[in-house]
Image: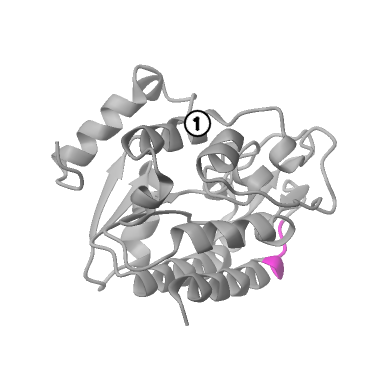
Amino acid sequence: MTNAKKLAKVAIKLSQSVGSLSFDDLTSYIYNPLEYAWEIHRQYLELAGVGKKKVIFLGMNPGPFGMAQTGVPFGEISSVRDWMGLKGRVKKPIPEHPKRPVDGLSCSKSEVSGRRLWGLFSEKFPNPKDFFEDHFVANYCPLVFMEESGRNRTPDKLPAKEKKPLQDMCDWHLREIVEIMEPEWLIGVGGFAKKRAEEALTGIEIQIGTILHPSPASPAANRGWAVAATKQLIDQSVWNE
């Protein structure tokens, strides 16, 4: 079985596992792009999941205008469609929040975090196959959580009784990815992802590092994220100058 097929198999298992969880009333809407955007996610795994990797970049969970639309981690529309060359039908989550519609690759909004992350990678590697020869990008948690207002609710804000079973499933999936791809490095995109990786991968031979999260909510990221992240990767000896 190819690595891409192994990744697809564990992604399906994760999707089914987290789909069985229940959450309190504050979490009014839950999107699972591994279900409704599976067609493009599978294509992403076929493109990105070939062979072993040197580096896995790990995000927290899907953003509303990134993976929630495309099924690709940090999946800003133009990066997925134009740079990666992926295409396909994205179904609708049920129920769908009226303020957070899923329009797939026709979504007119752009996720800043994804534009920054994939923008750096596509600038350094104009051909996506060159990037994916040694790199892979994943999200720790596949679910999007929203309050009644449409406000995003990140996994770290969930109550402990809900967080624990979710983390157990996501930890398992992360270990599976690492076992399949045998990377030298796991780079947490932001502090949450690094912390989860350190806990989930205890006892596994891998170097864990971090880069600044590219979120527009971060003043540091807004001062020049690509330069800062590149310096961090060079300083950690993940990338060469």
Residue 34 lies left or right of residue 85; in this view the side is right
Residue 20 magenta-drawn?
Answer: yes
- The colour scheme is one colour
Residue 47 lies left or right of residue 101; in this view the side is left
Whole-percent x, y for residue 228 in the image:
27, 27
Q: Which residue is mark 1?
A: 115
The residue depicted at 44 percent of the width and 73 percent of the height is 3
Amino acid type of the residue tagged 1 in the rendering: Arg
The residue depicted at 36 percent of the width and 32 percent of the height is 123
Q: Nearer the viewer, residue 196 or 126?
A: 126
Locate residue 14: give its quadrant.
bottom right
The residue depicted at 20 percent of the width and 44 percent of the height is 239
Whole-percent x, y for residue 225 in the image:
35, 26
Q: Residue furthest bottom?
A: 1
What's the magenta region? Answer: 19-23
Q: How many marks?
A: 1
Whole-percent x, y for residue 132 in the image:
38, 54
Whole-percent x, y for residue 161 in the image:
59, 62
The residue depicted at 49 percent of the width and 58 percent of the height is 47
**Secondary element at tag 1:** helix
Q: Quadrant of the C terminus?
A: top left
Q: Residue furthest top?
A: 223
Asked if 18 appears above or below 239 in the picture, the reply is below
Q: Bin the neighbour count of mark 1 within 10 Å (Cα to Cα): few under 14, some 14-19, many 20 and up.
A: many
Q: Nearer the viewer, residue 123 or 227?
A: 123
Asked if 9 appears above or below 210 in the picture, the reply is below
Magenta-colored segment: predominant secondary structure: loop
Locate residue 10: give its quadrant.
bottom right
Q: Nearer the viewer, residue 159 or 122?
A: 122
Residue 101 lies left or right of residue 15; in this view the side is right
Residue 225 magenta-drawn?
Answer: no
